[in-house]
Image (spheres, rainbow, N blue to C red):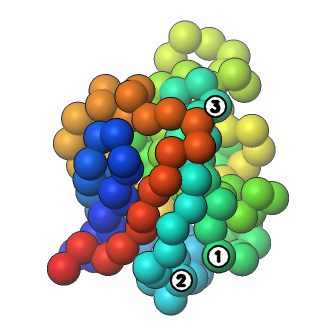
Amino acid sequence: MVKLKLHFESIGDIIVKLIDKNPKTKEAFLKAIPFTSEAMRWGDEIYFSTPVRVGLEVSQEVVEKGDVAYWPPGRALCLFFGKTPASTSPNEIRPASPVNVFGKIEGDLEILKRVKDGEKVEVTLLE
């Protein structure tokens, strides 16, 4: 099973287990790693730019808590751990526009609330 390690300055490492739902997206990330970016917050979503350029595959307008997805318009990796400004109900997690889900966050999602805008994040393959 392939896993990514996302290292944030404030909270340390977050592990992402990759899934086979969007194989082109998954492969594009595996080819782009390692890379560094700056994290941004949008409600209970963390996103950051990536060197990946892929279109929509099996895209979703609503995601689940813990989902990791690629947002093609911003070429961004997105970590979802709660409501976003686009959510229309208390339990809905809605990205800004459709995303390709290709992973799941392992472990405690609450720690992600401590990540700040502009914080450095390093993306590597977990060995």
Q: Earlier in the sequence, mark 3 or mark 1?
A: 3
**41 or 56: nearer the viewer:** 41
Q: Earlier in the sequence, mark 2 or mark 1?
A: 2
Mark identifier at residue 114: none
Q: Amino acid at mark 1?
A: Val
Mark count: 3
SS at mark 3? loop
Residue density around tag 2, few if under 14, some if 14–19, many if 20 or more, within 10 Å: some
Residue density around tag 1, few if under 14, some if 14–19, many if 20 or more, within 10 Å: many
Q: Residue at x 41, y 27 (%)?
A: 113
The Cα atoms of the two marked residues, 2 and 1, are separated by: 6 Å
The Cα atoms of the two marked residues, 3 and 2, are separated by: 24 Å
Q: Residue at x 36, y 48 (%)?
A: 9
Marks 2,1: beta carbons within 8 A = yes
Q: Specify whether residue 19 is in view.
A: no
Marks 3,2: beta carbons within 8 A = no
**Residue at the extreme top of the image, as rendered:** 90
In the rendered image, which quarter is residue 127 located in?
bottom left
Q: Which residue is mark 3?
A: 42
Q: In the figure, 35 relative to 40: above or below?
A: below
Q: Position of residue 38 (x, y in %)?
A: 58, 53
Q: Position of residue 65 (x, y in %)?
A: 42, 34
Q: Residue at x 49, y 53 (%)?
A: 120
Q: Which residue is mark 1?
A: 52
Q: Tell me the quarter of the image containing the N terminus.
A: bottom left
In the rendered image, which quarter is residue 90 located in?
top right
Residue density around tag 3, few if under 14, some if 14–19, many if 20 or more, within 10 Å: some
Q: In the figure, 89 relative to 16: above or below?
A: above
Q: Amino acid at mark 2?
A: Ala
Q: Which residue is mark 2?
A: 32
Q: Residue at x 33, y 68 (%)?
A: 4
